[in-house]
């Protein structure tokens, strides 16, 4: 059962948040890495592409917290399903966020050869490709009806507007005692105060999302689906 719900977009320090929440005892923390690391978890998310009922206990079975897409896109549904859970909205300067998202696109599967990668990379990408209907639903919700992931990145102004709309919507939808708007550069203090836990003695795990993604993608493309240990390094 979830106790902490991450509502922030990717590239707002979600790798750091995963590591921090797990260090604070709110793990395992669900991240896009967990979806991409196995067909069984991809299967759990496929019903979210439609409008039918969703069993969140099944989708997030085994996890105590969630961050990053696709989970953070459905923050409202999770907040309703788990009324006792607290919500953390990770934020950053919107234009810096957009530049970071462009790095994500450039270093992700789009950067691979158009001829198609050999196994195990091809197998991995085929599995991840099954998420396309879900990702298309998310794209349409964020950027307008008919928008799909195949359309490629939106322009900076449109992306920043979507980021700011999302931030405003989350802020307006939850009472202050249930919501923390958090920049990971703030470190342990505000997060621990909000979650009512002690501040660890070690530094906050400021992980580089771009580097984390590159490391993860390289491992997945080699067929290595073991736990991405870099996520738990401080």
Image (cartoon, rainbow, N blue to C red):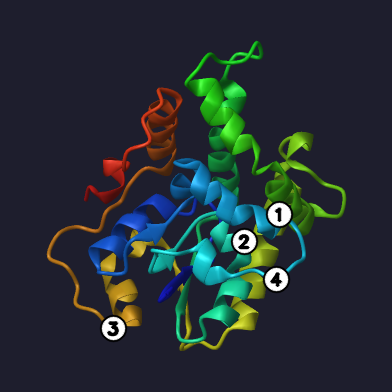
Separation of residues labelled 2 and 1 (CA atoms): 7 Å
Q: Position of residue 218 (x, y in %)?
A: 41, 26
Callout 3 touching callout 1 (CB < 8 Å): no
193 vs 164, left or right, is: left
> Would you call the spot at circle 3 few (<14 residues within 10 Å), some (14-19), or many (20 or more)?
few
Element at badge 1? Answer: helix
Please give the label number shown on residue 53: 4
Query: Can you see residue 3?
Result: yes
| Residue in the picture at 58% in, 37% down | 128
Q: If you read the primary sequence from the N terminus, does the residue marked by circle 2 or circle 3 appear first?
A: 2
Label 1: which residue? Answer: 138
Callout 3 touching callout 4 (CB < 8 Å): no
| Residue in the picture at 82% in, 46% down | 147
Callout 2 touching callout 1 (CB < 8 Å): yes
Q: Position of residue 108 (x, y in %)?
A: 54, 30
Q: Of tags 2 and 3, which is closer to the observer?
A: 2
Separation of residues labelled 3 and 4 (CA atoms): 33 Å
Q: Nearer the viewer, residue 194 or 4?
A: 4
21 vs 13, left or right, is: left
Element at badge 3? Answer: loop
Q: Quadrant of residue 186?
A: bottom left
| Residue in the picture at 45% in, 25% down | 221
Separation of residues labelled 1 and 4 (CA atoms): 17 Å
Q: Of tags 1 and 4, which is closer to the observer?
A: 4
Residue 178 higher or lower than 89, as above or below? below
Q: Nearer the viewer, residue 114 or 208?
A: 114
Q: Residue furthest left?
A: 201
Label 2: which residue? Answer: 73
């Amino acid at each position: 059962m979830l106790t902490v719900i991450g509502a922030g977009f990717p590239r707002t320090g979600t790798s750091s948040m995963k590591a921090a929440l797990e260090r604070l005892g709110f793990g395992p923390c669900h991240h896009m890495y967990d979806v991409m690391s196995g067909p069984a978890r991809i299967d759990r998310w496929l019903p979210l592409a439609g409008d039918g009922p969703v069993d969140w206990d099944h989708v997030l079975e085994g996890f105590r917290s969630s961050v990053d897409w696709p989970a953070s896109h459905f923050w409202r549904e999770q907040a309703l399903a788990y009324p006792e859970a607290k919500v953390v909205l990770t934020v950053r300067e919107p234009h810096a966020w957009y530049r970071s998202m462009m790095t994500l696109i450039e270093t992700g599967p789009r950067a691979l050869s158009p001829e198609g990668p050999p196994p195990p990379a091809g197998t991995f990408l085929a599995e991840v490709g099954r998420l396309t209907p879900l990702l298309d639903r998310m794209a349409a919700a964020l950027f307008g009806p008919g928008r799909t992931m195949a359309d490629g990145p939106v322009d900076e102004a449109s992306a920043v507007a979507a980021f700011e709309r999302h931030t405003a919507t989350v802020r307006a939808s939850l009472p202050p005692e249930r919501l923390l708007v958090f920049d990971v550069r703030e470190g342990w203090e505000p997060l621990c105060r909000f979650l009512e836990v002690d501040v660890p003695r070690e530094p906050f795990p400021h992980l580089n999302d771009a580097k984390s993604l590159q490391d993860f993608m390289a491992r997945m493309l080699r067929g290595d689906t073991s736990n991405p240990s870099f996520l738990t390094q401080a």
